Amino acid sequence: MGESVAEATLTTWLKEVGDTIEMDEAVFEIATDKVDSEVPSEVEGVLVEKLFNVDDVVAVGQTVAIIEIKGSETTSHEIKKSVEEAPEVKAIEEDIKIVKGTIEAPLSVSSDSDRFYSPLVKNIAKQEGISVSELEGITGTGNEGRVTKNDILDFLKNRTSGPSEMPKVTQETTQVAPQNTQTVSQSNPVAEKVKETPKAATSINANGSELIPMSRMGKLIAQYMVDSIATSAHVQSFIEVDVTNLVNWRNKFKNSFEKREGEKLTFTPIFMEAVAVALKKFPMMNISLEGDTIIKKKNINIGMAAALPDGNLIVPVIKNADQLNLVGMAKAVNDLATRSRDNKLKPDEIKDGTYTVTNVGTFGSVFGTPIINQPQVGILALGAIRKVPSVIETPEGDFIGIRSKMFLSHSYDHRVVNGALGGMFVKAVADYLEAWDVNREV
């Protein structure tokens, strides 16, 4: 995981106990923010034990599974003997036992109850006001009849007092360091709030309508959009741009560029370059707001909204975009776009963006009103490029000609960005594109 990632939610086990695992073969999948990642094994062997279940939140550095390494002909008796004789091996075994015990050992709800419940179930019971007698009456479907999260949520749905919303809870996790084992409590309310529910097939209600459960990413995006609208005072500025020279220039060089660099030359890296130049000219668009404090960002990290096959969006970030030439920008854009579609982005690659660009023209939209990607204060939507009749001014007079034009839609946070700055910024992007040098080499 990247340096900024502290924990992740285990979403899928790709291997079962007893399965043979090759080196670099994926064992399970995790979710951090909006990125789903496969975690590969660093060894060959057989999966002998899972230490976490699906939906558990796991801290970076924790042991998630135990793999028995292949190629050892040692018998179980010899293993037991070696453990007894080797203090360092015994210490490792003790650490594993402590980890397992901390993870698996549930705590009783109260001194009046002989039944044991996981910390997650206890937290839900506490926040929903479920009594010990009610809790003990719930039929558990977990290991040894234990009550699971789904069991208690099903109970809440059918409770006589009416259904309750799923509470925000914290997840107990453990951290094992060399020669030191300790329990660390960490909370991840967003992950708990949008955690993937057990996969359910679509169903039909009484009116014949199809009921489709939202995906984990869909829930995340929905919550982010609502939070952004509630946080920022959105206002928009629109400007039309004549990109005829730019279109002609790209048509002239795109084939030779692809042959030389092995990369397609799309319009996106050109737009990213224009935005990076404008952010350097207007650094107060490259900020975030925390409380009453404005944080002026040192680096220009531009987020690039990318469409996924399932219809959702993800925003990988081009770090230090102002330091890239057009070739470097094209390679970065193509790489991030490809790995976004293939679900191969790393968690750090969607972090630390300072401004975002979204290309609504990809789907034929002329312009749009995008929602700000918090905690940023601005987002630019690129409309479709269209050939339109236009008035062309010349020394001999005005006439009508066919030009390639597009709209830029700039949404910005009116709490800290006034109309003058918001308008000047998008005008700077437009001026850069309209003044494109048709003789520029790439």
Image: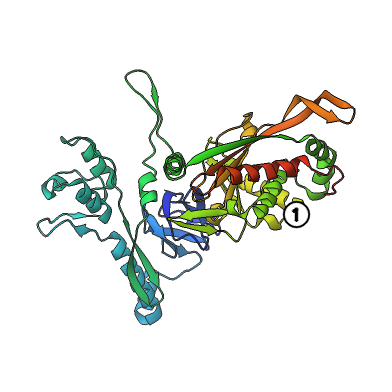
Q: Is residue 284 left or right of residue 88?
A: right
Q: Position of residue 128 (x, y in %)?
A: 21, 46
Relative vertical location of residue 180 with respect to residue 248 in this rendering, above or below: below
**Quadrant hosting residue 202:** top left
Q: Is residue 264 visible?
A: no
**Quadrant hosting residue 66:** bottom left
**Quadrant hosting residue 250:** top right
Task: Sort mark 1 into few (<14), some (14-19) or many (20+) by Cα contacts within 10 Å.
Answer: few
Rendered residue at 53%/35% (across/down): 311
User: Mark 1 = which residue?
Assistant: 325
Rendered residue at 51%/66% (across/down): 71
Rendered residue at 38%/35% (across/down): 200
Who is closer to the viewer here, 141 or 316? 316
Q: Position of residue 345 (x, y in %)?
A: 57, 51
Q: Residue furthest left?
A: 112
Q: Is residue 307 left or right of residue 16?
A: right
Who is closer to the viewer here, 440 or 122? 440
Who is closer to the viewer here, 325 or 75? 325
- Amino acid type, residue under disc 1 in the picture: Asn
Q: Is residue 102 visible?
A: yes
Q: Is residue 148 left or right of residue 236?
A: left
The secondary element bearing badge 1 is classed as loop
Relative vertical location of residue 306 with respect to residue 85 in this rendering, above or below: above
Who is closer to the viewer here, 295 or 52? 295
Relative vertical location of residue 106 with respect to residue 180 in this rendering, above or below: above
